[in-house]
Image: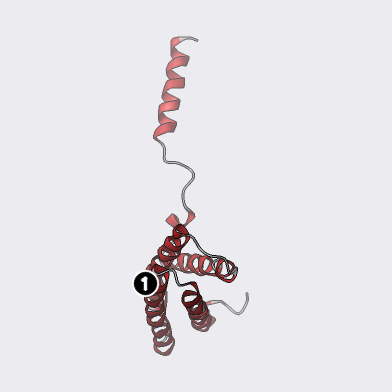
Amino acid sequence: MPRREALLVLCASVTSALLPSTQVKSEQYLPAGAAQFSRVLAAQKQWGSLKPVLQSGRTLDDSEWENLRTILRAIYQVSSDMEYIAKPWAADLKSSATQDIQKLRRTLKDMDQPAKQRQLEEFSNKYQEVQDLFESFFKTFSQASVGDVPDEL
């Protein structure tokens, strides 16, 4: 291979190695509000995926209990995204959402102790309460978003 071609190949490989990866997380480029909404939806989906595990009746091992505690903390953090989403809402809807968010936080904190002590029944009893709070938040979201979509659509 001539020297010039070898130099071109070398430059091309170095340049391509320095370019940012084309595989990026889609959330990274979402605008404010959309990123928070995406995280809340993902948290609700993750929470919903726990139902079959909790209803299976089988004994959970230590790593599964630690995963449950990690999920509790992650969803607790997502509650700040819920607050961000509710900021521009009308006062009554914002108040309703704030109450749901505060109740969600309390419930998640209450669930940590049964998870720490590996008490499946007590943990499972609170599961539906969190699911209902997610649903209540999204119901309030739909009421707050009614005027956002043009009638032509």
* Residue tagged 1: 80
Q: Secondary structure at mark 1?
A: helix
Q: Residue at x 45, y 41 (%)?
A: 21
Q: Count of labels shown?
A: 1
Decide which of 132, 122 is in the foreground and name it. Answer: 122
Q: Position of residue 43 (x, y in %)?
A: 48, 67
Q: Kindly tell me whether residue 4 is visible in this rendering.
A: yes
Work out which quarter of the rendered image holds the C terminus and state it: bottom right
Decide which of 3, 51 is in the foreground and name it. Answer: 51
Q: Position of residue 148 (x, y in %)?
A: 51, 78
Tell me where residue 70 sits by quadrant: bottom left
Q: What amino acid does circle 1 point to?
A: Ser
Q: Position of residue 32 (x, y in %)?
A: 40, 65
Farthest-out residue, bottom: 92
Q: Residue at x 37, y 80 (%)?
A: 106
Decide which of 59, 106 is in the foreground and name it. Answer: 59
Q: Is residue 63 above or below residue 107?
A: above
- How many residues crowd around disc 1 within 10 Å: few (fewer than 14), some, or many (20 or more)? some
Q: Kindly tell me whether residue 84 is visible in this rendering.
A: no
Q: How is the image coloured?
A: secondary structure
Farthest-out residue, right: 153
Tell me where residue 103 sits by quadrant: bottom left
Q: Position of residue 95 (x, y in %)?
A: 39, 87
